[in-house]
Image (cartoon, grey):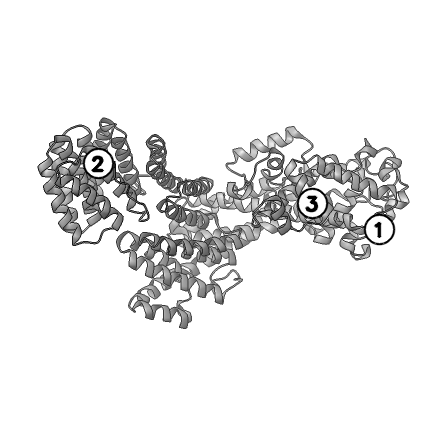
Amino acid sequence: MSEHGGPAGADGCDSGRRHEPHGFPRERAALTIASRGAGGMPASRLPEPLAAPGEHLGKDVLWRFMTGGLSPAEMRHVFGHLLRGCPSCREQAREVWNIADPPAAAVRRAMVEATAAAAPPAGEAETFCHAHFKAVHEHPPLPPSLPTPAPPAISATPPMPATPATQAIDTAGSNEMAYETVLDRVFSRIATEEAGIEAARRRADVLFEELMQHPPAHQQLLIHNSARFRDRMLCERLLAASHDEGFREPARSEQLARIAVAVAERVADICPEAALDSSCPAPSDALAGLRARTWAQLGNALRIKSDLDGAAAAFRSADALMAAHPRLGLLDKARIFDLKASLCKDRRHFAEAARLLDRVITIYQRLGQSNLTGRALSQKAMLQFHTGDREGCMVLLRRALDLIDPHEDPRCYLNARHNLILALADDGKPREAFALLFHTRPLYLKLGDRMNLLRLRWLEGQVARGLHRLEQAETAFREVRSAFVEMGLEYDVALVSLDLATVFAEQGRATEMRRLAEEMLVFFESHQILPEAMAAFLVFCNAARMEQAGLALVQEVAAFLKQARHAPDLRFGPPR
Amino acid sequence: MSAPDTSASEGSLEHFLKSVRPRMRTLFAHYRVPPQDTEDIVQQALLALLYQRQAIRDPEAWLMGTLRNKCLLYWRERRRKLYDAVDAAVLELMAEPMAPEQEGADVRRDLEMAIERLPERCRALLSLRYNQGYEPPELAERLGYRPTSISKTTNRCLAALTRELTMTGLGRRKTS
């Protein structure tokens, strides 16, 4: 018997002698394989096809080895066999791995790239880059086409008996029809599930309404005590409501997010490893994704309330869940990164925010969500704006506008256009800003809500100021200012007042500037405004009182107020 | 994009599934995921689509992107098993008492040579692991990696080693 069984040449080599590992007699090598199973396991306990001493490993076994399809003991056994130097099996393994053939790898690479972003997520695969690793990591282990009919010389090696699994694997690459049965089965189950999910969604709406009739403390009590409220769809409903309230009422947004967290944790308690049916709300990864999103939403609500430390703590919980569940849904991950990027921006951790947004953009691109990609690009653009990179900001906004569908998401589209006009005006390009504003005006009017119309008017004032149409600018700023005063938006009152002050400064109207400063001071003393913003504002007021507030000072205070709005830790350094 | 309004009735889901079916088949065949293993992948992706449909603008693109990602994760996990096996086998080999025979010494020497051909970072990591028995937390501390990233880094090095061993093999002096 040869070392691996079979006569000389059975493995495709012409001489049995060449199979002897390291020149040792065949019997010794056979003994090595037969006497030691993997991990110390006796060889007799290994599955028959792998354990037979003195035999070569079949191509299907090697394929399953290369693709991790064997048990751990079998995996170690096969590797041990290769490690101890069976040239024939190594040759086969090389073929199976399919990396010994660079042209084939190059073709595969092109195919993978052409089928759009098949590479592993950047953040998960790129701690340090090296071509050596990338060759292994970027390509999914696509084995050579199987089955490869064994040539006569090889077939002389005792073949591995084909198991149903290997047969399935063998046909996988070459026959798409092999998937038909599976798809039929899953589609049928999903069709049944859909009705259940719809019912669950309607039930969640009812539960939400019921829950909202109770005071917040009672709501938490209900979540803890009543099983009815431990519902995944209710949690989704709460998340959506919390998100919407973030624009209107941050305190309520936080309250809703806290209930969502409680619901998600309760759902996780009752269904830790959920099976797939309507009675059990979600598989564990989906559930972990939901929990992580609730923490992220809470973090976002706290951020809006300017509780940045609380927000960071909530995001730590979301991060921990993501770390514990690496297979979390991409959409969940993108949502969390997106919200976390906003926190990083507010904390002025711009590099981290940009990194997160890049991941968000990559995910949305991979999922083919052009609208969401546009939205994320728009966010990243504003990050550039805050870091002073106007040019980069405008490039990103233009890309975003190409992707956002104005019919599907008019608000987001308008937002991007608004920011682009703002960036153009800020970058000393008032004519371009004016042209774009002219074409965007109908969209503002179409959306029609008061806040958007005020934003339009404010922007008109800023563009007019850039064009040195100072009377028009003054009129616009006064109108907006008076509306903001009426609405009690003190911070916006401060910002638009400073815009008005720049008009006075440009015209040298020191008396009117002084009067404006005094009016503003009275207004702010009766309202709450961030202490640092107030301090900066007082610098301006004092200068205005002495009729020494020049354009540079006004612009500096205005720039500080814009930055300090979401960064209360920022300190104002008065100009020397 | 021909994706349906997923908020509509069951009929539209049926239409959607019918329209994406050929692409799904092609995708799985491209990634060579065994049919029996695609069941979970498809099921999870479609369920996620139903649950999150309000957040998804382009269901077909989303589904294909998600399936593609799941196929990659599937293979990544399978490959991880390969690296674990390589790691265990090498550790086992190193733990064997020094065999007087030429074979044992040759295998060790060949393994060391394979490691020598790897990038510097991997050489350091694998040498510490296999020659001095460092555990991952110790490796992280010694080599300056974060404890959370050491397993990822180790896997990359094992991937490189596996590739090296499979490409050039051990005992190639004997066979060449």
Residue beneath the point at 56% across and 35% down: A112
Residue beneath the point at 60% across and 47% down: B150
Name the mark nearer the viewer: 1 or 2: 2
The quadrant of the picture occupied by the C terminus of chain A is top left
**Residue to which mark 1 is pinned:** A34
Q: Quadrant of residue A11?
A: top right
Name the mark nearer the viewer: 2 or 3: 2
- As helix, strand or loop, the secondary structure at mark 2 comes to helix
- As helix, strand or loop, the secondary structure at mark 1 comes to helix
Left or right, A105 with reference to A11: left
Image vertical order of residue B161 relative to residue A181, above or below: above
Q: Disc 3: which chain?
A: B
Type of amino acid under label 3: Leu
Question: Spatial distance from mark 2 to mark 3, Cα to Cα?
Answer: 61 Å
B111, A43: nearer the viewer: B111
Type of amino acid under label 2: Leu
Same-chain status of marks 1 and 3: no
The quadrant of the picture occupied by the N terminus of chain A is top right
Question: Spatial distance from mark 1 to mark 3, Cα to Cα?
Answer: 31 Å
Question: Spatial distance from mark 1 to mark 2, Cα to Cα?
Answer: 86 Å
Q: Which mark is residue A553?
A: 2
Q: Where is residue A157 in the image (x, y as percent from the top left)?
A: 82, 42
**Residue to which mark 3 is pinned:** B128
Q: Where is residue B94 in the image (x, y as percent from the top left)?
A: 77, 48
